[in-house]
Image (spheres, rainbow, N blue to C red):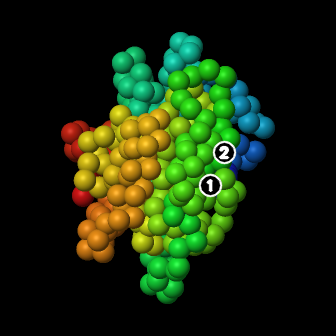
């Protein structure tokens, strides 16, 4: 059985939540979902327990209405394999700043530095991509099959909040990037507060280029996140992204990458995609769609199962090129 303790929000619902349900289906297992306000029904089976969200950092700190922590959860599911699936670096920040012992069997994080830090301390850890699920991507495909590519209302789109801030750190405010793009005469959509899946799909369909950024919202480290970015290629809107160290080899020839913090380079990549001939753009979109479908949340979790739990393929990569 797959037991999932969720951190309910828009981003989780259409990526992690639905991905875990699809993962359970691939394994032919029941999927039981809880939130922290619910009482767990004990199970002595060999379950897989996935804890999503900042509530679980692996230490013994009590969280949630029931005072749950990993030790407490193990009393309900004593024979289970427990996975902490961080949303981004804030969820595991304490491991960098403080020396808490890990209580989970595996840590997955979208922050490359965090996953490497876990490994250096002897923990099982890996990096995952906050992508979408096949079900969500199919909805984008259905939109495109029905409506095609609407007339563009903007040249570029970055569906992330702005401004972002953190006291200190080495990154720039997103507004600096956005102002630079608009100062170059490029029409840009950002900070749309778009929390509807259908609305997000339409917003990308109405844009020429999707901009991915690993600039964090309120955390000390860059991290890979943003499942909505991957909706773009399914509706004719190619994705570009910054050169995050966790994705350099992974994205080669699939996602055009601009140098982080280099606004002229980002502008150059936007223009590069806009000026592609139809055949080249179609081939780029096809590669991005194939990559997204190859690395859905459920497919990444299936590789987790084979590598860490079943141990039938110890060399398999969670993130892989199709």
Q: Quadrant of residue 77?
A: top right
Of helix, strand and loop, which one carries label 1? strand
Q: Pick whichever of labels 1 and 2 is earlier in the sequence.
A: 2
Of helix, strand and loop, which one carries label 2? loop
Looking at the image, which is closer to me, 256 or 118?
A: 256
Q: Residues within 10 Å of mark 2 (few under 14, many from 20)?
A: some
On screen, residue 279 above or below 301:
below
Q: Position of residue 266 (x, y in %)?
A: 43, 47
Residue annotated with mark 1: 190
Q: Residue at 65% x, 47% y: name it.
A: 161
Report the side of 125 relative to 314 (left or right).
Answer: right
Contact (CB < 8 A) between labels 1 and 2? Answer: yes
Q: Residue 87 versus residue 31: which sits nearer the camera?
A: 87
> Taking the image as drawn, is residue 292 in sight?
no
Residue 162 tag number: 2
Q: Residue 74 placed where, x, y %? A: 57, 33
- The Cα–Cα distance between marks 1 and 2, rounded to whole angstroms, is 8 Å
Residue at (53% x, 79% y) in the render: 151
Judged left or right of residue 142, residue 54 is: right
Residue at position x 41%, y 22% from top?
A: 117
């Amino acid at each position: 059985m797959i037991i999932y303790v969720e951190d309910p929000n828009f981003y989780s619902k259409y990526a992690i939540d639905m991905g875990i349900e699809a993962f359970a289906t691939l394994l032919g297992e029941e999927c039981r979902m809880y939130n922290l306000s619910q009482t767990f029904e004990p199970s002595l089976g060999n379950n897989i327990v996935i804890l999503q969200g900042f509530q679980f950092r692996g230490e013994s700190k009590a969280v949630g209405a029931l005072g749950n922590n990993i030790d407490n959860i193990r009393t309900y599911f004593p024979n289970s394999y427990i996975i902490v699936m961080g949303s981004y670096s804030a969820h595991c920040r304490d491991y960098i700043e403080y020396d808490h012992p890990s209580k989970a069997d595996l840590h997955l994080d979208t922050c490359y530095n965090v996953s490497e830090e876990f490994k250096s301390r002897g923990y099982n850890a890996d990096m995952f991509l906050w992508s979408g699920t096949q079900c969500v991507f199919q909805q984008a495909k259905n939109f495109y099959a029905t409506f095609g590519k609407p007339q563009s209302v903007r040249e570029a789109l970055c569906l992330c909040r702005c401004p972002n801030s953190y006291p200190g750190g080495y990154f720039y405010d997103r507004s600096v990037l956005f102002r630079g793009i608009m100062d170059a005469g490029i029409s840009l959509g950002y900070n749309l507060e778009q929390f509807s899946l259908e609305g997000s799909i339409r917003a990308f369909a109405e844009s020429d280029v999707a901009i991915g950024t690993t600039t964090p919202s309120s955390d000390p480290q860059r991290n890979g996140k943003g499942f909505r970015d991957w909706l773009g290629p399914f509706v004719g809107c190619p994705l570009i992204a910054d050169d995050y160290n966790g994705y350099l080899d992974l994205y080669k020839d699939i996602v055009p990458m601009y140098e982080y913090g280099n606004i002229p380079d980002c502008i150059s990549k936007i223009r590069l995609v806009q000026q592609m001939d139809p055949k080249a753009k179609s081939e780029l979109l096809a590669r991005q769609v194939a990559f997204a479908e190859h690395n859905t949340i459920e497919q990444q979790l299936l590789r987790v199962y084979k590598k860490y739990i079943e141990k039938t393929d110890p060399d398999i990569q969670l993130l892989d090129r199709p």
